[in-house]
Structures are given as structure tokens and as C-alpha cells.
Image: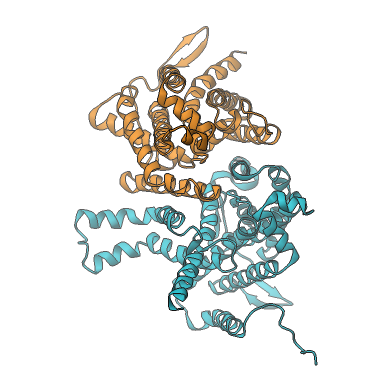
Amino acid sequence: MTIFLQSLISGILIGGVYALIGIGLTIIFGVMRVINFAHGDLLMVGMYGTFYLFTLFNIDPFISIVITMPLMFLYGGFLQKVFINRILGALPQNQILLTIGMGLIMSNGIMLAFTSDYKILSTDYSSSSFDILGISISTPLLISFAITAGITVVLYWFLLKTDTGQAIRATAQDREAAQLMGINVKRMSIIAFGLGASLAGTAGALISPTYYIFPQVGSTFTLKAFVITVLGGMGSIVGATLGGILIGVAESIGGVYFGSGWKEVVVFVLFLLVLLFKPSGLMGKSNT
Amino acid sequence: MKPLFKNTTGIGALPAITGLLVVVLLFLFPRFVENTYALHIMILIFISIVMGSSWNLLGGYTGQYSVGHCAYFGMGAYTTMMLMQFRQIPPWLGIWCGMVAALVVALIIGSICFRLRGPYFVLASIAVAEILRVSALNLKNITNGAEGILTTEIPPLKIGGALITDFSSKVPFYYAGLVFVLLVILVTWLLQNSKLGYYFQAIREDQDAAHSLGISLTFYKNVALSLSAVLTSLAGSLYAVYVGFIDPSTVLALDLSVQIVLICIIGGIGTIFGPVIGALVLVPLSEALRSNMIGESLINSGIVKADSAFGSFLTENLSHAHVLIYGVLVVVVILFMPDGVLGFAKALAARKRKEVV
């Protein structure tokens, strides 16, 4: 029972970060209807940013998100303006391929610049943990979960209460109607991709004390982000939040009971099952 | 009087003769060129054409974008290698088993994933390929896991006591590759002019319309996938036996699936020669980067000094980033020539013709 609780708790903690990755992807999909295959690579860029901020300027990874977030927002906005806005009307497969290409450029560009060596960002609390009722909780994971929760709350507030947030949601609901209502959809797209990129980058910053950092780290997270968004229902932010936590838990419990090598299979099988039996996702509207 | 030989194919005499000439020249190629590096590049091009063309049957003609085609490549590669290495079954028999294995996987994947459409199908195809990769990584007692399989010896091919080849040079692989290329091109060509091919294209253009005309979507999508998977496994088997080493991160990786799609996209999808063009563009380019030819030639020609910071950067790093060129190419192609190089060239030619008239 302790083992179960232990893996449940660590699953929820890591699930918070997954949720952040998933929310970013789902916002991008909701507004642009483009599946961003470069999402994990954005996260990887965030990881490298955090790593160098830490090694060069000695800025703590959890504090450095104050710098990473706006930078990644600008970077995402730039990508949207230069590349993705051009192909919004193109075939979905071409959009997918474009983002795959962007991802390849990012991961290989980083590899050229910083080699493919694994980097480890070790802070003095990287491997520290504390016990509650016999369950040990990793300090960096707990901190990152708290930050994730904070960011998610702010994000919900932004999307629900501010004018820009409502414009973004309107664009996601119906692009043309939004345009007729005088919303600048191109600008909303840029903001949406910027938001998605900055969430991915922040997730990268948050996990950098506990993960290896290398140029190809992105692809695992891209796949996880897909699983999370499909699980929650494409475009649903609440769904992505729940999906992230669910995947974190499934991975953690699957790893304990099937062996850590198989935990990814558990996730993908879950993914296929959801695709087959409820393709609109757990929180998605049913197909009409 | 009826003509004795009726040309129903719609192929002109000139292209037919040119095609025949190219094939003959390709068959004679190893007789004149003994440079092993040239042969190596040719074999790589052949493998790329085979995997690109096979994908083209599903992605180009039927419109089902599978980004998990490494699954079939890997099935071919693994089956052939495991049979050869652990059961002493020669590769020319193993290849058939590889095809059967790929077919079985394709039927399973097809029956699950073809219930999904568009982006969902893309994601499902990736998920299935990843499950296979992780399985190959974890089933250590069958696949050797992350260590991969290394060939120690390929048994010599004998027919009726006469030694055909002992696989000591690259020439037999060259001919095997060439035969496979001709096979997939023939299959594509036959398909393009057949009823089956029209069914495929109808599904690509409009699934619902095709369905309302009585074309069974699931059945024909599965036919396309099976055909495509079996041919892809050929490329995988040839690659495995030729290179002599496979592991999950080379033959079952997402990168490989992307590469397969890119060969088609860059050349032009849904055309017979698109994948050929794609392979001819991509393979030499990525080989030039991998072997650092570009960096060296920049230094040798005096543009970049070898001892400068940029020079040493080139020599050290450029070879690691041959995948970068795939990224740059795909972005350029999607943004500026969405119909691929072949489509772009055709459009250019059409514009020229208009100007002349």
C-alpha cells in the first residue's frame, strides 16, 4: 500500500509539469488547429536556457523561469509570425511536417552549438526529499508542482477574465466568427503560440533539476504532450490539466508494477485505448 | 486491321526508351565503377527509394499519413537479422519472414488505427511505432535490447551447388537494392493505372464521397497499408543485412519515420518518381554532411581557414548535424514548394511554356 501511495504521489507531482506541457499544446491546437510537433523541442530549448542561466550566472532554475518565460514567449511568437501563420490554410499534413521540420532544426541546432553530451543541472536540493507518514517526497518535484499550480491558476484567470484571454478563446471556438467580431486572429495566434512555447519552456525549466538535458530530450515530451492533450480532449484546457496528472500517475504506477522499461508502453496503450473508444477525449465534446 | 500490340499504357516511346536505358546503365554500373564509396551511396539511395515509394503508396496515393513507418522497416530488419543471427536462416529466406511479420503488424495496426482520421491517425501511428520500439528495447532475450544485433557472418548464397555470391563485396547488395527499387516502381506504376489505385486515390481526395460510392474505406486502407508495409520491410531487411548492425534507436526510431515521409514530401507525393527525386536529393546531401565533405571542401578551397574558430567548429560538429539538413529542407519545401521538388519543377515548366505561347 505504501508503494502504491508513494508512486501515486510522485505521479501526481510529475503530472503537474506534464499538465503544463499539455496545456501549452492544447492552446496552440485550439487556436490554430495545428498539432505542434516541435512542442518537446521548445521544452528542450527551455531546459538549455535554464541550464546556462544556472551555470553561467548562477541563477536558481526555479527563479530563472522569470527570465525563461518571457523569452520563450517572444521566441514562440516569432516562430508563429515567421512560419506557422503562412501555412494556416494548408493541408493538415503539411502543417504537421512544418512543425516536425522546425523541431529538427531546433534539436540539431542545439546539438551543433552545445554538442550532444548529456548535461546535468545539479542544485544542492536536486536529490533531497522529506518524509510524510512514511512516504518520501522529492523536494524539487514538490516545488515545481507548486509553481505549476500557481501558473495554471494565473493562466485560467487570464483566459477567463481578461479581454485578450477571451479573444483567444473566441478564436479557438470559431476563427471566422471571431474575425467578424473584430478580433485580430493573426495576433491571437501569435499570442497563443507564444503562450504555448512559454509554458513548454517553463516546464523545461521546472524539470531541469531532475532530468538529463540533451538535444533529443524533446521527442519523448512531444509524444507525452500528444497523449495528454488527446486524453483530455484536443483544445480543452481543463482536459489537458487532468490528462497531465493522469499520465503522470499512469507512468509512475505502471513503472512500479511493470518495470520502469515498460512505463512508456503503459502510457501509449492508454493513449490508443482513449483514441479508439473516446477519440474526443475525456473532457472533449462528443462527435456530432 | 487490329494492331498486334496495342499500347494501352499511355507511355510515349521516348520516355520508355530512356527508362530502359537508365535501367540497363544501372545494371552495368558496378562493372565500370569499382569505387566502394560510390556503390555505398547508390545502395543507400536504393534503400531510401524503396522506403519512400512504399510509404508513397499509403501516404501519397491513399492520403493516410503514417508517421510510424519505422515499425515496418524495423519489423523487416529485426526479423531478418534475428533469423540469421540466432537461427542461422539465410537472409534471402529471412526477408520473406520479415515481409510476413510486417504484414501481420500492419493488419493489427490497420484494424486499430484506421478507425481514426487525420491528425488522430498520425498520432496513433506514432504511438504504435513507439510501442514496438520500447518492446524491442525491453524484450532483451529475443532482440538483444539496446545492445542491438551485430552480424557475424552472412552465409554464402548457393543455387544447386553453384556459388552465386558470398556477400564479401557491396555488389550483391547493389543488385538486391536495384531489384527492390524496380519492384516498388513497378508496383506503384501498376497501381496508378489500376482500379485499386483509383479506389486509393478516391479515398485520398474525399473519404466520405468514396464511401458513398460503395468503396469500403477500412478494407482498402488496410490493403494500401499492407502493401506499403510489406515493401517497407524489404528496405528494412536490406538495410539490416547490408549495414550488419541494428538497434531500436536506428531502425525503430521516430526520426526514421520522419525521414521516410520527408523523402516523399521533398520529391513530391503521390507521383511515381517523387520518392526517387527525394532520395536523390536527400541521401547525397546528408552523406556529404555526415562525411564532412562540405566542411572539408570549404576549408580546402580557402574560404574558411582550418585553424580558425569557425573552421574547427565545422570539422568537429558539422558531421553530427546531418539531420539538420532534413529540418531545413522540409521547412523550405513546405513553405515554398508544397508539391515537392517535382511539382515545383513541373509548375516552373508550365509557366515557361505559357510565356512562350
* Pick the front one: B42 or A255: B42
Image location (x, y in percent) of residue A237: 52, 26
Rendered image quadrant of residue A200: top left
Q: Is residue B87 visible?
A: no
* Pick the front one: B117 or A63: B117
> Where A129 falls versus A202 (above or below)?
above
Q: Quadrant of the N terminus of chain A?
A: top right
* Pick the front one: B86 or B1: B1
Q: Colour of chain B?
A: cyan
Q: Is residue B103 visible?
A: yes
Q: Colour of chain A?
A: orange
The residue under the point 54% across, 55% down is B261
Image location (x, y in percent) of residue B250: 52, 51
The residue under the point 60% across, 45% down is B122
Q: How many marks?
A: 0
> Where A43 falls versus B35 (above or below)?
above
> Where B295 falls versus A87 (above or below)?
below
Image location (x, y in percent) of residue B194: 73, 67
Image location (x, y in percent) of residue A284: 62, 28
Rendered image quadrant of residue A255: top right
> Where B339 falls versus A58 (above or below)?
below
Residue farthest toward the top in the current orientation of the protein: A133
Name the side, left or right, on which A39 lies relative to B126.
left
Colouring rule applied to residues: by chain
* Pick the front one: A112 or B4: B4
